[in-house]
C-alpha cells in the first residue's frame, strides 16, 4: 500500500473506557462514526484511528479485531482495512485482524500515531524486511473565511481569513 489513505472520514474510536472493549463496542463506535456522521457512502480507503491505552491482552485484541472486521464488512468501503492506534501493539492486533478480516482484504495496522480530524496518512512500502511501514501524517489546514453577510465587516486583506503559523510559515 503506497497511496494516500484518508484518516479524516472516521472520528477516533475511543476504547479507553473503564471496562475492556467488546467486539460489539468497537463495531458500534465505527458505525456511529460512519452512519450517524453521514459518511456511509465512502469510496476511498479510510483509516480507523483507535485511541486505547489498555493492556494488550489476547482476549482484548481479539475483541477489537473482531469488532473492526465486522465494521469493515458492514460500514467501510472495499479495499484495505487500515487501523492506526496509539497503543504499542500493532503487530499483535494486526495478526488478530488478519484472522478476523476476509482474506481478500489487505490489513494494515500501524501503532504510535495520534491522528485527529483532517489528518491524512501516506503509507509507504514496507522496509527493514517487511517489519516497518514508513508513514507520513499530513494535516490539512483551511483558512477560516468570513462571508459577506457576517456582522463584522473588514476592509483590509490581512483580516479576511484566519491562518495558522507553522514553523514560521503562514499557512
Image: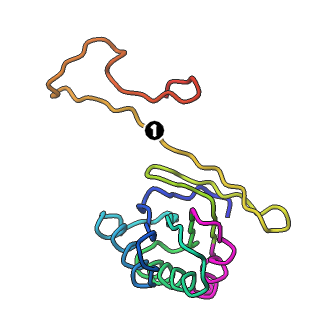
Instruction: Say which of 142 and 79 sits in front.
Output: 142
Magenta span of residues = 86-107
Q: Residue at x 50, y 58 (%)?
A: 7
Q: Is residue 67 above or below residue 43?
A: below
Query: How many numbered discs, if any?
Result: 1
**Residue at numbered disc 1:** 141
Q: Position of residue 53 (x, y in %)?
A: 53, 67
- In this view, 142 is above or below 165: below
Could you tell me which residue is drawn at 56 percent across and 65 percent down?
85
Q: Residue at x 35, y 64 (%)?
A: 39
- The correct choice, above or below, for 135 with respect to 167 in the image is below
Specify the quadrant that holds the N terminus: bottom right
* Quarter holding residue 80: bottom right
Q: Nearer the viewer, residue 5 or 25?
A: 25
Quadrant in the rendering for residue 32: bottom left
Residue at 65% x, 66% y is: 88
Q: Using residue 116 as the reference point, say whether residue 113 is left or right of it.
A: right
Residue 16 forms part of the magenta stretch: no
Q: Provide residue 122's location: percent of width, then percent of height.
A: 63, 54
Where residue 126 sits in the image (x, y, percent)? 77, 63
Helix, strand or loop for disc 1? loop
Left or right relative to 90: residue 145: left
Amino acid at each position: 500500500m503506497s497511496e494516500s489513505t484518508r484518516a479524516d472520514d472516521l472520528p477516533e474510536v475511543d476504547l479507553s473506557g473503564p471496562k475492556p472493549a467488546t467486539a460489539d463496542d468497537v463495531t458500534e463506535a465505527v458505525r456511529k462514526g460512519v452512519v450517524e456522521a453521514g459518511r456511509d457512502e465512502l469510496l476511498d480507503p479510510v483509516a480507523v484511528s483507535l485511541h486505547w491505552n489498555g493492556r494488550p491482552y489476547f482476549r482484548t485484541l481479539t475483541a477489537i479485531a473482531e469488532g473492526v472486521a465486522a465494521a469493515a464488512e458492514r460500514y467501510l468501503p472495499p479495499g484495505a482495512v487500515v487501523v492506526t492506534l496509539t497503543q504499542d501493539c500493532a503487530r499483535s492486533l494486526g495478526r488478530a485482524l488478519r484472522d478476523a478480516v476476509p482474506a481478500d482484504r489487505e490489513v494494515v495496522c500501524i501503532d504510535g500515531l495520534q491522528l485527529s480530524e483532517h489528518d491524512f496518512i501516506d503509507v509507504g512500502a514496507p522496509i527493514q524486511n517487511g517489519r516497518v511501514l514508513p508513514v507520513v501524517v499530513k494535516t490539512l489546514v483551511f483558512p477560516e473565511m468570513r462571508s459577506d453577510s457576517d456582522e463584522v465587516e473588514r476592509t483590509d486583506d490581512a483580516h479576511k481569513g484566519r491562518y495558522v503559523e507553522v514553523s514560521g510559515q503562514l499557512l
